[in-house]
C-alpha cells in the first residue's frame, strides 16, 4: 500500500457542485499539505497543516477549504467548483524537521465542466 | 519570500547524451534545495536534496546537482540519459524557518529522451 493515498484518483464534476478530495497517510508524519499542479505553473500550495489543530492558508487558498480530521487524514474541499479549478491535486506529508523531504500521493485529476 | 525559476520548459535529448536542467532561485534567507521527478501518471519522487556541506549532491538514478550560492543556482545533471528518464522534473526550495517542508516549486522541465 502507498504511504500517502489520495481518493478519488479521477473526478469529473459540474460547476457549482461541492466536492471533497481525501488524503490519508501511514507515515506517521505531523505535517500535511495540499498542492495544485497546472501545466507551466508547477505546483502551488493551497493549504498546509502542521498538526491536527494547526491549519494555514497557502498561496492560492481562495475557493478551497480543508479539514484535518486526524493526524493521518487531511481533506480538501471545493465549496462551489468552477472550471478554472480543473487541475491535478497532490497531497503531501513530512515530519517536523525543516530539512526533511516531502512525500507525495499519486494525485487526483479533477475536471470541472 | 522565495521563488524558483526553471529556465527550460522542455528539454529534448537523445539517449546516452548528457543533460543539464537549469534552476535558479531567489530568497532573502538560506534555503534547502530539492529536485523532484514526476513520471507519467504518478506523484512526485525526490531525486536529491542540498542541505549543507558539499555543493555537489548525488541522487538516485545517476543524477547529480551542484549548488552555486553566488549564482543562486542548483542545476541538475546526468552524464548519460536513458529512455526511462523521460519525465517532468521540478526544482524546489524550502527556507530554514518555521515553514518546514512548505516547498516553493519551479514551473517544471519536461525531459524527453529520444532513441
Image (cartoon, rainbow, N blue to C red):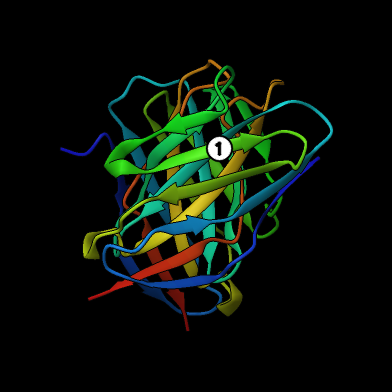
Q: Residue at x 53, y 79 (%)?
A: A15
Task: Assign a secondary structure to mark 1.
Answer: strand
Q: Is residue B23 left or right of residue B25?
A: left
Q: Is residue A82 visible?
A: yes
Count of marks overlaid on the render: 1
Q: Quadrant of residue B27?
A: top right
Please state the chain letter of the residue tagged with numbered disc 1 in the rendered image. Answer: B
- Residue A79, image x, y percentages: 57, 60
Q: Is residue A102 left or right of residue B24?
A: left
Q: Residue at x 58, y 22 (%)?
A: A53
Above or below, comparing residue B12 to residue B85 in the picture: below
Q: Residue at x 56, y 75 (%)?
A: A16
Q: Quadrant of residue A13?
A: bottom left
Above or below, comparing residue B96 to residue B68 in the picture: above
Q: Residue furthest left?
A: A1
Q: Is residue A103 visible?
A: no
Looking at this view, is B87 or A52 the one in front? Answer: B87
Looking at this view, is B81 or B60 the one in front? Answer: B81
Q: Is residue B80 left or right of residue A97?
A: left
Question: Quadrant location of the C terminus of chain B?
Answer: bottom left
Question: Quadrant location of the N terminus of chain B?
Answer: top right
Q: Residue furthest right?
A: B28
- Residue A19, image x, y percentages: 45, 61
| Residue hosting label 1 | B66
- Residue A6, image x, y percentages: 32, 48
Looking at this view, is B79 or B93 the one in front? Answer: B79
Looking at this view, is B88 or B69 the one in front? Answer: B69
Q: Residue at x 49, y 68 (%)?
A: A87
- Residue B103, image x, y percentages: 60, 39
Category of crowding for the residue at label 1, using alpha-carbon neighbours closer than 10 angstroms: few (below 14), some (14–19), many (at least 20): some
Q: Quadrant of residue B59?
A: top left
Amino acid at each position: 500500500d502507498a504511504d500517502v493515498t489520495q481518493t478519488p484518483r479521477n473526478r469529473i464534476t459540474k460547476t457549482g457542485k461541492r466536492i471533497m478530495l481525501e488524503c490519508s497517510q501511514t507515515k506517521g508524519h505531523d505535517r500535511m499539505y495540499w498542492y495544485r499542479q497546472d501545466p507551466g505553473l508547477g505546483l502551488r500550495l493551497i493549504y498546509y497543516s502542521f498538526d491536527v489543530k494547526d491549519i494555514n492558508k497557502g498561496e492560492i487558498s481562495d475557493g478551497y477549504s480543508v479539514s484535518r480530521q486526524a493526524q493521518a487524514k487531511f481533506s480538501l474541499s471545493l465549496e462551489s467548483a468552477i472550471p478554472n479549478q480543473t487541475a491535478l491535486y497532490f497531497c503531501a506529508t513530512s515530519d517536523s524537521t525543516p530539512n526533511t523531504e516531502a512525500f507525495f500521493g499519486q494525485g487526483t485529476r479533477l475536471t470541472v465542466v | 519570500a522565495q521563488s524558483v525559476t526553471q529556465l527550460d520548459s522542455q528539454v529534448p535529448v537523445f539517449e546516452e547524451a548528457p543533460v543539464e536542467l537549469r534552476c535558479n532561485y531567489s530568497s532573502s534567507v538560506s534555503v534547502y534545495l530539492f529536485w523532484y521527478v514526476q513520471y507519467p501518471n504518478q506523484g512526485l519522487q525526490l531525486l536529491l536534496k542540498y542541505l549543507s556541506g558539499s555543493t555537489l549532491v548525488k541522487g538516485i538514478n545517476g543524477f547529480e546537482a551542484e549548488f552555486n550560492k553566488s549564482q543562486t543556482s542548483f542545476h541538475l545533471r546526468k552524464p548519460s540519459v536513458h529512455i526511462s528518464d523521460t519525465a517532468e522534473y521540478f526544482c524546489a526550495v524550502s527556507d530554514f524557518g518555521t515553514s518546514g517542508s512548505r516547498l516553493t516549486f519551479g514551473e517544471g522541465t519536461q525531459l524527453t529522451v529520444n532513441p
